[in-house]
């Protein structure tokens, strides 16, 4: 959804977005593109299917500051796009985003003709373009999201082929997704083994209509799929089994631990473990770090020690997720050890009732809720509304599935 919003902003004509997301991150993306010059019209058809019409008004920046909320992708993707403008723009965010490092821009933007002033590598940052595409080398070890923004901005601004060389790229599937969406908007990027990306100039017609349907979100669905393995049969519609989304690999972990899985063209069904309890599994989440929280909830119900690799990717999320998962699942009686880049979860024991805290992290809140489904006592999640960042309807969906969910007013 956020990628589609960014490319709709860059599109010279009208873009129709079907199946739009409604999370806080999605709403932040819509607000950003309007401040950068796009108009957004929300339509509801007779069948109640909501759609967005987005048009680039070509009037430049409407306001001198854009706020990306708490969206890590939003800040890293939209900042290079905003730098296409010759106007001075302040880029800001909220909550945990203020603590996430943005040194990347300090290092790269001067090479592209962009002046930048940051808060010692953190938000807010002040930029002034226009971005001038050039052959550069970047470090991709912190996040692939910086590359996503550069690819889009380069594709819009390039007048000759230019190359971005990337060292130590992490989360490659997320770049696959970026390139997939860019291709649907008519941009040509050659991926040379994830080490070099060659961006060719885009065509520039006076008008170009684009229609894009947002895929179902495997990141959010992962929690419900794990819920199916733990607590009973569930079918989720709207998931593309051929998607480029990294978090689709949750199916591999579910299969490894003994959950029953069947997949159709547009739906996935998961039933509970064949023996009532899962088998310990080993999973490398380096390229899909957002799966750590649902995988920990899954491991809590798997007998033995499950191992998840890629802990180094968790430090700069909404919380330091490795420590947060260790603390909050520890309250429920789940032992988690951290050794180097590995997390080891001892599961298969009783999940006890406890009061836990989301740390204002949407995925921690959802992981604790899923773990609570077969706990021996009540699980109370403080700051539970953190789920609104990516999945506002999460608790309602759990209630629809039969879970006992109630809101406590302090």
Image (spheres, helix red, strand yellow):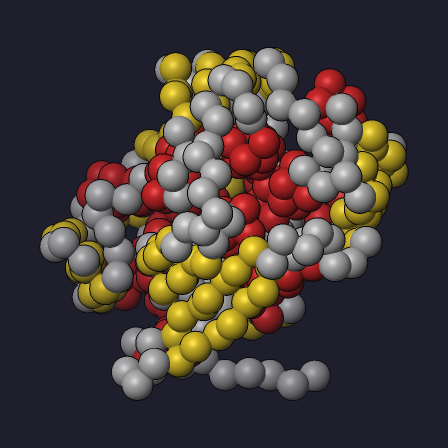
- Residue at position x 45%, y 43% from top? 205
Q: Position of residue 216 (x, y in %)?
A: 33, 58
Q: Position of residue 301 (x, y in %)?
A: 33, 52
Q: For the image shown, how many numbered marks are present on the structure?
A: 0
Q: Is residue 231 above or below residue 66?
A: below
Instruction: Answer with left or right where residue 250 lies relative to residue 393.
Output: left
Near-viewer residue (236 or 121): 121
Which quarter of the figure has residue 266? Answer: bottom left
Q: From this viewpoint, is residue 354 visible?
A: no
Which quarter of the figure has residue 124? Answer: top right
Q: Is residue 74 above or below residue 42?
A: above
- Residue at position x 73%, y 53% from top? 61
- Residue at position x 55%, y 24% from top? 159
Near-viewer residue (57 or 332): 57
Q: Is residue 409 above or below residue 174?
A: below
The quarter of the rendered structure image containing the C terminus is bottom right
Instruction: Answer with left or right where residue 391 lies relative to residue 95.
Output: left
The quarter of the rendered structure image containing the N terminus is bottom left
Q: Position of residue 4 (x, y in %)?
A: 46, 51
Near-viewer residue (360 or 238): 238
């Amino acid at each position: 959804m956020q990628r589609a919003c960014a490319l709709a902003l860059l599109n010279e004509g009208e873009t129709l977005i079907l199946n739009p997301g409604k999370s806080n991150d999605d709403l932040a993306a819509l607000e950003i593109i309007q401040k950068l010059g796009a108009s957004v019209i929300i339509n509801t058809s007779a069948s109640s299917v909501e759609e967005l019409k987005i048009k680039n008004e070509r009037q430049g920046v409407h306001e001198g500051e854009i706020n990306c909320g708490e969206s890590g992708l939003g800040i890293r993707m939209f900042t290079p796009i905003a730098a296409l403008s010759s106007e001075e723009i302040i880029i800001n965010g909220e909550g945990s985003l203020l603590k996430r490092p943005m040194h990347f821009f300090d290092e790269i933007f001067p090479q592209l003709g962009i002046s930048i002033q940051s808060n010692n590598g953190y938000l807010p940052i002040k930029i002034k373009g226009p971005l001038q595409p050039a052959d550069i080398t970047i470090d991709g070890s912190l996040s692939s999201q910086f590359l996503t923004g550069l690819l889009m901005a380069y594709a819009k601004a390039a007048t000759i082929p230019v190359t971005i060389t990337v060292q130590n790229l992490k989360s490659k599937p997320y770049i696959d997704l970026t390139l997939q969406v860019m291709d649907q908007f008519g941009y040509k990027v050659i991926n040379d083994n994830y080490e070099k990306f060659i961006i060719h100039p885009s065509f520039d017609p006076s008008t170009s209509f684009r229609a894009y349907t947002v895929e179902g979100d495997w990141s959010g669905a992962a929690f419900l799929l794990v819920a199916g393995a733990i607590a009973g049969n569930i079918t989720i519609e709207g998931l593309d089994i051929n998607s480029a989304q990294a978090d689709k690999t949750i199916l591999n972990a579910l299969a490894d631990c003994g959950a029953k899985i069947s997949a159709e063209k547009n739906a996935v069904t998961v039933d509970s473990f064949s023996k009532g309890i899962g088998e310990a599994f080993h999973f490398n989440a380096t390229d899909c770090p957002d799966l750590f929280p649902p995988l920990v909830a899954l491991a809590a119900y798997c007998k033995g020690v499950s191992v998840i690799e890629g802990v180094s990717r968790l430090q700069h999320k909404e919380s330091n997720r490795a420590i947060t998962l260790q603390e909050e699942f520890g309250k429920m009686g789940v032992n988690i050890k951290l050794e180097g880049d590995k997390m080891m979860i001892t599961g298969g024991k009783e999940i006890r009732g406890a009061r836990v805290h989301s740390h204002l992290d949407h995925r921690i809140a959802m992981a604790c809720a899923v773990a609570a489904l077969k706990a021996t006592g009540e699980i109370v999640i403080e700051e539970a509304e953190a789920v609104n960042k990516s999945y506002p309807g999460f608790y309602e969906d759990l209630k629809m599935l039969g879970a006992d969910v109630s809101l406590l007013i302090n």
